[in-house]
Amino acid sequence: MKLNIDEYAHLRSPIHAWQPRYKLIGLGALMFAVAMVETLWLVPVIMGLTALLYGLSRLPWRYWLQRLRYPSFFLLGVILVLPLMSGETVLWQWGPLTLWQEGCWAVVLIVGRFLSILTLSLLLFGTAPFLQTVKAMRSLGLPATLTDMLLLSYRYLYEIADQFLRMKQSMRLRGFGYAPTRRIPLIPQRRDLQVFASLAGTLFIRSYEQSERVYQAMRLRGYGNSRSQLAERDRPRLDPWSAIATGLSLTMAIALVVAEYWIGMKA
């Protein structure tokens, strides 16, 4: 189970050369602008823009597809449910099932914004070491407690995933999943639900106990007795390329907001 989001941070590309602090400002502004898009005609624009940025980053498309695996369940639910439950104009009807035009347009809008924001997030966290990105957040004013929590959560996700895989393998070795009775597809049995609940509870308890041990170890080493401040020398100076990239991204974000406002006024 691979969770390392910055495995391609060593690549060379214009996005990788963008300093994390200013990359956070530029891509963050773009994500906010994309989230404000309500006009259907702007969806190809934002998707084309994010695809262009992703191509410039030289990240493999396999990396994007792997991170899309779990969010795709949410997208699948939206695609299957929303066109059948929302709208006024009927496109197709068969018995109790009705396909609504407004629901289809809403699906296009939601999926387009979701994929664009996901891609921009991968560009933000996948083109620089995670520690540098967290330091950039800290330099922009994120409280030290939140940055510590973020680092520790990212660090121990790997151990929790390893514990989950070991417990899952142990369940298989003990015969879980090989019941002789016939199963109904996509419907778990009551015994399976009990096993999954026990697995989740055990994993939660182990994670809680480990967090207590880590916190006690940090307290014994003096954590919390003094507040560390980010020195000015640790803040990188703005280089020409980062200035250009940040300016372009902010310009594109403002253009999207203005276009959305202008189209809304016309409508």
Image (cartoon, rainbow, N blue to C red):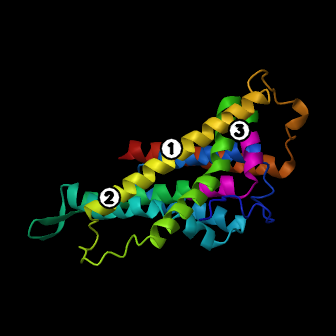
Q: Amino acid at mark 2?
A: Leu
Q: Amino acid at mark 1?
A: Ile
Q: CA gap, disc 1 to disc 2?
A: 18 Å
Q: What residue did someone put label 3 on?
A: 137
Which badge, 2 or 3, is on the more N-terminal residue?
3
Q: Residue at x 71, y 66 (%)?
A: 56
Q: Secondary structure at mark 2?
A: helix
> For this view, does 156 lie left or right of residue 103?
right
- In the picture as drawn, the residue positioned furthest to the left comes out as 95
Is 183 within the magenta?
A: no
Q: Amino acid at mark 3?
A: Met
Give percent across and percent down for residue 44.
49, 63
* Quarter of the image where one finds residue 61: bottom right
- For the residue pair 40 and 232, the one nearer the viewer reads as 232
Q: What residue did someone put label 1 on?
A: 205
- For the residue pair 139 and 204, the one nearer the viewer reads as 204
* Of marks 1 and 3, the one in the foreground: 1
Which badge, 1 or 2, is on the more N-terminal residue?
2
> For this view, does 205 lie left or right of residue 253?
left
Q: What residue did someone put label 2 on?
A: 193
The answer to whether marks 1 and 2 mark residues whose Cβ atoms lie closer than 8 Å is no
Q: What is the span of residues highlighted in magenta in the rendered image?
A: 119-136
Task: Name the dominant secondary structure of the magenta segment.
Answer: helix
Give percent across and percent down for residue 198.
40, 52
